[in-house]
Image: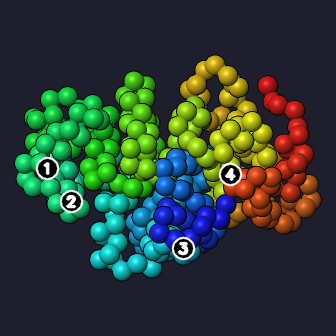
Amino acid sequence: MMGAAGENSGLIVRGLTTTFDTPRGQAIAAADVDFDVAPGEVVGLVGESGSGKSVTLRSIMRLIREPGHVSGRVEWHGRDLVAMPAEELRKVRGGEIAMIFQEPMTALNPVLPVGVQIEENLVAHTTLNARDRKARALELMNIVGIPAAERRLQEYPHQFSGGMRQRAMIAIALACSPKLLLADEPTTALDVTIQDQILKLLLDLRDRLSMSVVLVTHDLGVVAATCDRMAVMYAGRIVETGTVTDVFNTPHHPYTRGLLGSVPRSGASRTVLQSIEGTPPSLTNLPEGCAFHPRCTFATDLCRKERPPLETVGALGRAVACFHHSQVAAAEAIL
Ligand SMILES: Nc1ncnc2c1ncn2[C@@H]1O[C@H](COP(=O)(O)OP(=O)(O)OP(=O)(O)O)[C@@H](O)[C@H]1O
Ligand SMILES: [Mg+2]
């Protein structure tokens, strides 16, 4: 999993930990998260609701506010985003690194027309003149499938439907041709045709610009179709990671196995994460040992006492946090 450090190493996340002080105690929303994204690589981040996917992306972009606290290292082309001065970070954010938010309305400015928001981004991060910026804005509207682009650019976010807002946000995010895109459920609100178009667009940008992508999604079909590697999160931790092929073929963590349980091995490509029996743990009151043990059919006394570390298994970049991973990997496929 360790990438070579240096200029062209893309994104290297090490020990990223995000906590929130809540009335019920400290919630550890992301715990010791390690992963790499090489230039041109698409990494899928999956896990059930509340597992820390959005918090991880926001922490990378340094968008966690009080009462949140972030520690660890987020290296982007050799520079640490966690420690970088705010001024420098502003240049990186929205330019080299862009984010598509899960909630479009939190990202769009309600008092500015969509065109102005694209424009602002282009002014901040490119040297395009006014005419070229206008042309670029129109081009982006077309790319993300917003009809009547000329008129739409004058309109405010509240005049857009949910799906159109999502597209507008994607247009803003892609305006400066980022080198790294953090995409949090970018296509969830969209119908299948547009979803396919947008995913195709992301892959195209990956090919043309070596853009790296971290893609958060609930749709394992999307992971299978678009991602090179994937990481599975549970209760704020990465519990399994590897190439999409390896993880789908032989899940080593019981939680991953549960998620994949309902995915047909071939045929239907759209499958939403299966829900697993039991409920996710409270982040302010995690179980001892492995956080998954109360829901796990493989759990033993060891799992109830000690937390399994994320350890490399087999190929480089293949890691799992489970004491019984060999047994899980060897277990018969669930039908
Ligand atoms: N500002 C905050 N204060 C307190 N807790 C927070 C805050 N922001 C997030 N959390 C907690 O962090 C945990 C992880 O949240 P996160 O939004 O990352 O989940 P997620 O994996 O993105 O889920 P979903 O699939 O529903 O989007 C949640 O339990 C959430 O309540
Ligand atoms: Mg989320």
User: Mark 1–mark 2 contact, CB under 8 Å?
Assistant: yes
Residue named by callout 3: 73
Q: CA distance from mark 1 to mark 3?
A: 35 Å
Q: Is mark 1 within 8 Å of ligand 2?
A: no
User: Mark 4–mark 1 contact, CB under 8 Å?
Assistant: no
User: Mark 1–mark 3 contact, CB under 8 Å?
Assistant: no
As rendered, which of 295 and 82 lies closer to the eye?
82
Q: Quadrant of the C terminus?
A: top right
As rendered, which of 4 and 281 lies closer to the eye?
4
The kind of residue tagged 3 is Arg
Furthest residue in direction left, as rendered: 131
Q: Which is more N-terminal, label 3 or label 2?
A: 3
The image position of residue 138, as x and y in percent, is 16, 39
The image position of residue 128, as x and y in percent, is 15, 55
Helix, strand or loop status at disc 1: helix
Helix, strand or loop status at disc 4: strand
* Foreground: disc 2 or disc 3: 2
Residue named by callout 2: 126
Query: Residue 145 appears in which quarter of the rendering?
Result: top left
Q: CA distance from mark 1 to mark 2?
A: 9 Å
The kind of residue tagged 2 is Thr
Relative to residue 125, is residue 129 drawn left or right? left
* Foreground: disc 1 or disc 3: 1
The kind of residue tagged 1 is Arg
Residue named by callout 4: 241
Q: Which is more N-terminal, label 2 or label 1?
A: 2
Helix, strand or loop status at disc 2: loop
Residue that appears at 31% across and 51% down = 177
Can residue 305 be seen in this snapshot? Answer: yes
